[in-house]
């Protein structure tokens, strides 16, 4: 759709304390340009590889962090997205970091307060991550990717004590 510069918007989800927990906008940097990026039709091609699917099935049966040791951060993020699509909340929770020095949410609290996104919302937010680029920053990193609508997103990851990667709590901010 055609959007005039005066129709640009920003949406921010905030806590009662005013902390931003979700943010999206239609402005795309580039020196203040008001042009929307081109949609990313390839983002629709989200699917686990055969190897990722095998690990995912094993995780659903008996979560074992050793299965994640040889996976890339993008593969782990894809497992997170698939668990979200499938409503596998316990698998999704187990993909989060367990580092004591990082923000955490108790599993029972997480499962009881879990908000459920529609498949369409999941597609809009996460599809495209499979073509993302991982940017490592020592003990953390993020995957930059372009979603279905041409919007650039970042998905935060944390390096675990065993050297594997895990999803940061609140990976998208």
Image (cartoon, helix red, strand yellow):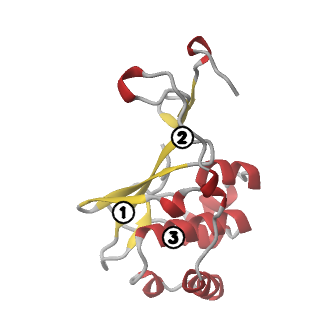
- Reading the image, the residue beneath label 1 is 158
Residue shown at 55%/68% (left/top)? 78
Q: Marks 3 and 2, Cα distance to the nearest angstrom?
A: 25 Å
Residue 113 appearing in the image: no
| Quadrant housing residue 134 | bottom left
Instruction: Check whether the beta carbons of the residues at disc 2 and disc 1 lie within 8 A of each other.
Output: no
Q: Is residue 160 above or below residue 59?
A: above
Secondary structure at badge 1 equals strand
Observer-side mark, 2 or 1, equals 2
Q: Is residue 20 left or right of residue 164?
A: right
Q: Marks 3 and 1, Cα distance to the nearest angstrom?
A: 11 Å
- Reading the image, the residue beneath label 2 is 151
Observer-side mark, 3 or 2, equals 2
Q: Marks 2 and 1, Cα distance to the nearest angstrom?
A: 23 Å
Q: Where is residue 54 shown, x and y percent of the image?
A: 60, 87
Q: Is residue 109 above or below residue 149?
A: below
Residue shown at 51%/70% (left/top)? 95
Residue shown at 57%/39% (left/top)? 38
Q: Is residue 168 left or right of residue 91?
A: left
For marks 3 and 2, the one nearer the N-term is 3
- The label shown at residue 122 is none
Other-residue count near label 3 (Cα within 10 Å), few / some / many at <14 / 14–19 / ≥20: many
Secondary structure at badge 3 equals loop
Q: Is residue 161 above or below residue 35?
A: below
Residue shown at 61%/63% (left/top)? 81
Q: Nearer the viewer, residue 72 or 89?
A: 72
Q: Nearer the viewer, residue 98 or 26?
A: 26
Q: Is residue 34 left or right of residue 90?
A: left
- Reading the image, the residue beneath label 3 is 95
Residue 138 appearing in the image: yes
Secondary structure at badge 2 equals loop
């Amino acid at each position: 759709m055609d959007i005039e510069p005066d129709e640009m918007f920003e949406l921010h989800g905030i806590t009662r304390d005013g902390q931003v927990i979700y943010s999206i906008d239609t402005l795309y940097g580039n020196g203040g340009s008001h042009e929307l990026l081109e949609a990313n039709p390839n983002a629709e091609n989200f699917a686990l590889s055969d190897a990722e699917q095998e690990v995912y099935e094993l995780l659903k049966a008996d979560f074992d962090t050793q299965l994640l040791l040889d996976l890339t951060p993008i593969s782990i993020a894809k497992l997170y997205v698939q668990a979200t699509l499938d409503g596998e909340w316990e698998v999704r929770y187990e993909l989060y970091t367990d580092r004591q020095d990082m923000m955490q949410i108790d599993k029972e609290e997480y499962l009881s307060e879990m908000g459920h996104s529609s498949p369409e919302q999941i597609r809009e937010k996460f599809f495209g991550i499979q073509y993302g680029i991982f940017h490592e920053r020592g003990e953390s990193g993020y995957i930059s990717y372009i979603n279905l609508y041409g919007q650039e997103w970042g998905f935060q990851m944390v390096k675990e004590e065993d050297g594997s990667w895990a999803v940061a709590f609140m990976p998208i901010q």
